[in-house]
Image (cartoon, coloured by chain):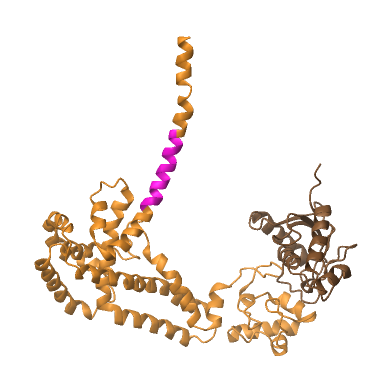
Amino acid sequence: MGFDSISNSSSPLPPFSKDLAKKKRTNRSARLKQSKLDVRREQWLSQVKNKGCEVDSSGRGGSPPSCMQIPHMQNRLVETSEMRSREEENDNSSIHDSDLESLLNSPVGSSLDSNASRKDHPRSSSSTSSDCCSRSLSEEEEDDGCLDDWEAVADALGINDNQQNPISEPPVKPEARIGSADTELPKRSSGVDLLKTESGGVVPISQMNSRAWRPDDALRPQSLPNLSKQCTFPMNSERHCHRAIPWAWKSTISQPSSCPICCEDLDLTDSSFLPCTCGFRLCLFCHKRILEADGRCPGCRKQYDPIHGDVGFNTGATPFKIGRSCSMISRS
Amino acid sequence: MQASRARLFKEYKEVQREKAADPDIQLVCDDSNIFKWTALIKGPSETPFEGGVFQLAFAVPEQYPLQPPQVRFLTKIFHPNVHFKTGEICLDILKNAWSPAWTLQSVCRAIIALMAHPEPDSPLNCDSGNLLRSGDIRGYQSMARMYTRLAAMPKKG
């Protein structure tokens, strides 16, 4: 009887503990998710008031990722905002100009060029876009003077501040600073001093700036959330919309490695062969077979241009390739 | 010949890889002949064909993909653009609007779209087309639903 009662009492334990473990697991994942959400929420909240971050960064919140990330993120945001004030004109305009230039300079579909310029672009646009949102943030921060919670942090960090500023200034943005760096630096330090005297709360932020990472910095920890990712997407689509150069994005987006009709690999001649304005690519062999049949583009079902059909290959090919493909036609 | 085989083989691999991509379509290649395929498609929701599973037979010509595959319903279906006895389908992309860029998978999708949006003005099934053309939507739907239940649903019992 006693044994029975013991076993009875112990029997419900295993399922219970299993339940517990399960609960724990779900709790953990939920907490992880929650902490991610928290980070995002804090960002928005910090635009209104800075107090929310303090609670987390003191580390008692029980969500380690968030208390790691929040200070960093703020650093980065404010840092980029300061950078923006310096280079918003020249950075923005120069990048767009150079991009446009490269597009204009290569009127024939040299996909290499457009690829390169494109590769550059998302990063720059992302940094500027993150600057956009961060600028308003920092402005609001500086406007409201009630940052009493940061004072404790300010005191703690105040010791290191003076050494860190000169050391970590260079890695912040080594490039694109040729003209402005010398003139801007004193202005900035004086601004910091001014803030120091005004309210201790802003000081740690502006000084931690110098330690922040740029999105493309090699030293930047992987664990940092990539804000620019969220920002780039709309920018990208916008870019595609208002830059209406059809061949440019077609050459980068729809460049199949094999012919969609016969599934043979596209060789160099094939991949520079653009028989239809709709951008549908196929190999020369299939193109010829289609011309022998009904002669309509598989992509848009429009009749292939008869001139293109006979001579072919004018569009999107260098003169050398035209010659070669012509000789192929005459032989066949 | 060689091209069609290579193309079908690639489509086969594509189908194997993306089995879960489209749960409404199940494309199966004949074990011994890559030019014979069968497909199982689910009747689209909010149509009289909802809940039914319809079998299609594909006969792929050797000139594929320059020529369209021949597709017909093996399952009886009451639809203005499907022949009630033979299962022949009247669909532009299977005739003059075919493009080599289409695949067997996309043909299945087009057929599902045709089931949801019948074209009563070019009927293969005159009864069904007449019901729709005379505005008897209810009559058409109940007939179609009846045949779906009879032919395209597992027998209960």
Does residue A25 show up magenta in the picture? yes
Q: Residue at x 46, y 37 (%)?
A: A22
| B28 and A305: which is toward the camera | B28
Please indicate whether residue A221 sits to the left or right of residue A200 in the image: right
- Asked whether the viewer can see residue A177, the reply is no
Residue A129 percent coordinates (x, y):
36, 72
Q: Quadrant of residue A166?
A: bottom left
Chain shaded orange: A
Q: Residue at x 50, y 76 (%)?
A: A112
Please indicate whether residue B145 sits to the left or right of residue A134 in the image: right
- Asked whether the viewer can see residue B118, the reply is yes
Chain shaded brown: B
Residue sitting farthest toward the top: A1
Q: Is residue A83 above or below residue B28?
A: below
Please indicate whether residue A312 sits to the left or right of residue A142 in the image: right
Q: Is residue B58 above or below residue A239?
A: above
Question: How many numbered circles are shown?
Answer: 0
Q: Which residues are magenta?
A: A20-35
